[in-house]
Amino acid sequence: MSVEFVDVSLSYRSAAVGRGLGHRSAPDAGTGAPAAAGNGLEHVSFRVGDGGFLGIMGRTGSGKSTLLRLAAGLLAPDEGRVLVDGRDINARAGRGRRWLRREMGFVFQFPENQLF
């Protein structure tokens, strides 16, 4: 599976209101608190080819989790496109992403808080 970000931008303000996703908020995976307003990711572009690997490192609050939420279709970008195997994952919401859920899973930073 290939993943490509093409000039992707997302502000934390739009993530906090769940823009285009029907969610009230996009909580911080560590604390569960709503994300702070401000700059998030700005004009991010990269491609990871089929079978490739990518390491993501950065300080707290640098956008690592936001980047991965975008890749999994849990957030929609303000600008740009996220492509998985050449398909824009935000072209169709809801059931239009069912194929993505079969291809990609997401383990949150503290999975023990997700169990019920």
Image (cartoon, rainbow, N blue to C red):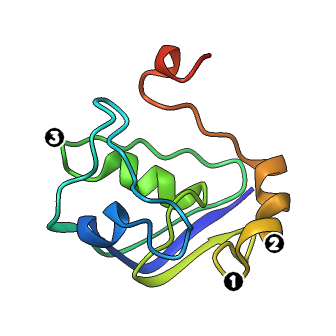
Q: Amino acid at mark 1?
A: Ala
Please tell me which of labels 2 and 1 falls first in the chain: 1
Residue 47's image quarter? bottom right
Front residue (pair 37, 50): 37
Q: CA distance from mark 3 to mark 1?
A: 31 Å
Q: Residue 81, percent across and down?
A: 53, 81
Residue labelled with disc 1:
91
Which of the marked residues, 2 or 3, is nearer the chain's N terminus? 3
Can I make out residue 45 in this image?
yes
Which is more foreground, mark 2 or mark 3? 2
Front residue of 13 and 108 = 13
Please provide percent x and percent y for residue 1. Answer: 75, 56
Callout 2: SS: helix
Q: Amino acid at mark 3?
A: Arg
> Mark 2 = which residue?
96
Mark number displayed over residue 59: 3
Q: Are marks 2 and 1 in contact (CB under 8 Å)?
A: yes
Left or right: residue 96 compared with residue 116: right
Q: Is residue 104 left or right of residue 31?
A: right
Mark 3 surroundings: few (<14), some (14-19) or many (≥20) residues within 10 A: few
Residue for point 49% across, 53% down: 69
Q: Earlier in the sequence, mark 3 or mark 1?
A: 3
Q: Is residue 85 above or below residue 29?
A: below
Q: Is residue 39 left or right of residue 16?
A: left
